[in-house]
Image (spheres, rainbow, N blue to C red):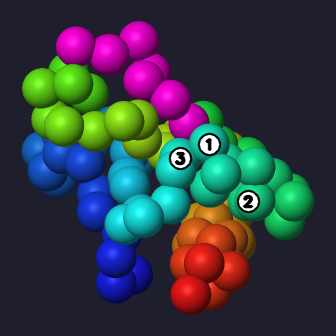
Amino acid sequence: IEGVSIIGGPSQKIGVVSFAIDGIHPHDIATIVASKEVYMRAGHHCAEPLMKAMNLVATSRFSLGMYNTSTDIQRAIESVQYVKALFN
């Protein structure tokens, strides 16, 4: 999705996807996607020194598990697109 930056590379992923959207605070993202009944975390994720080193105020984070379905993932993607549409 244009304007969305995934934090970390593929070799660093274990079912957790941290990301940032240009110009939108992560806490706003989390609040808005929750209105779509999609839930995520926003903040420092117990890594404030790393966030500072990466020049990030915070990140948004989806955590996936073996119980998630492709429908869940599609809803997460659609919720991020919805956030972007609200701010454009």
- The 10 Å Cα crowd at callout 3, few under 14, some 14 to 19, many 20 or more, is many
Which of the two marks, 1 or 2, is nearer to us in this view? Answer: 1
Residue type, mark 1 in image: His
Residue type, mark 2 in image: Val
The mark nearer the N terminus, 1 or 2, is: 1
Q: Position of residue 71 (x, y in %)?
A: 70, 72
Q: Secondary structure at mark 3?
A: helix
Q: Is residue 70 visible?
A: no
Which of the two marks, 2 or 3, is nearer to us in this view? Answer: 3
Residue type, mark 3 in image: Pro
Residue at image point 75% right, 49% down: 31
In the image, taking residue 39 as reference, residue 3 lies left or right, namely: left
Residue assigned mark 2: 33
Q: Position of residue 25 (x, y in %)?
A: 52, 50
The mark nearer the N terminus, 2 or 3, is: 3
Is residue 45 rendered magenta in the image?
A: yes
Residue assigned mark 3: 26
Rendered position, 81 above or below 54 = below
In the image, taking residue 33 as reference, residue 41 lies left or right, namely: left
Q: Secondary structure at mark 2?
A: helix
Q: Secondary structure at mark 1?
A: helix
